[in-house]
Image (cartoon, grey):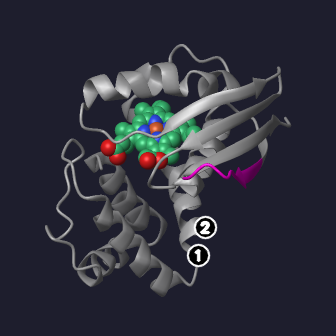
Amino acid sequence: MLGIVFTSLIDMLEDKVSPEFADEVIVEANLTNDGAYTAVGYYPFEEMQKIVGILVQKTGKSANDLLRDFGYYLFGKLSTVHGDVLAGADDVLHMLEYLDGDIHVQVRKLYPDADLPRFTVISRTDSTMRLRYYSERELYPLAEGLMDGAAHYFDCELERETHQLDTPHTYEFSLKVIS
Ligand code: HEM
């Protein structure tokens, strides 16, 4: 998993709680490199699972809630560092429509080893979309937070529902722009 995901997660803990809290989490998660991540390095996904596991213990929140909060925060980071890849998008659904065929394609060019999920647009109107998500990591709550963060970036709000499909590792988001 790309380092920017880890550096953003640690930044979130420092910003939203405190640098001391971030240090405690790093120590308790017993990370292989003591949490010394760089944005362009690659690290095992298990490291992120360890960090989330410690956060579950320390905050009492569920892993899904934590991943959703983190997705929201992460979109802010990604849009700052990679604002250029969003340049062609007019609104949140437009951006999600081009996520798989354009945004993550550009990401893959920058970071050839990135492990990216697959998104497929199932249906689309001006204000609604059904978007299918496939990833063996099943980080659908992270995707939910990223979508909410994207909605905030485009100055609107999304009403959304998530359904797990019978196909393994596959979820479908029903989205509606409500303001
Ligand atoms: C500025 C726009 C975006 C950029 C630059 C971006 C870039 C990235 C990067 C660098 C990763 C990490 C890959 C790795 O771990 O190796 C990633 C993962 C991911 N991205 Fe995006 N992303 C963007 C927007 C979004 C949005 C809006 C969604 C929500 C639907 C999304 C869904 C995901 C998910 C769920 C993952 C985790 C990997 C997985 O599910 O297996 N991304 N993205």
For label 1, the residue is 62
Residue at the limit of the structure toward the right, as seen here: 178
Which residue is pictured at 38% across the width and 68% down the height? 49
Q: Position of residue 75 (x, y in %)?
A: 51, 42
Horizontal relation, residue 30 to residue 162: left or right: left
Query: Can you tell which quarter of the image residue 107 is in?
Result: top left
**Above or below, comparing residue 172 to residue 48 in the picture:** above
Residue 113 tag number? none
For label 2, the residue is 65
Which residue is pictured at 51% across the width and 55% down the height? 138
Amino acid at dot 2: Asp
Q: Position of residue 28 (x, y in %)?
A: 28, 84
Amino acid at dot 1: Ser
Q: Position of residue 156 (x, y in %)?
A: 75, 35
* Highlighted magenta segment, given as a residue range: 161-168
Mark 2 lies on a secondary structure that is: helix
Which residue is pictured at 66% across the width and 21% down the height? 94
Q: Between 140 and 38, which is closer to the camera in this rendering?
A: 140
Q: Between 21 and 36, which is closer to the camera in this rendering?
A: 36
Horizontal relation, residue 136 to residue 164: left or right: left
Residue 162 in magenta stretch: yes
Q: Residues within 10 Å of mark 2 (few under 14, many from 20)?
A: some
Mark 1 lies on a secondary structure that is: loop
Tell me if label 1 and label 2 are in contact, CB under 8 Å. Answer: yes
Q: Position of residue 134 (x, y in %)?
A: 53, 43
Instruction: For residue 32, say whether it is visible.
Output: yes
Where on the image, by quarter, is ligand 1? top left
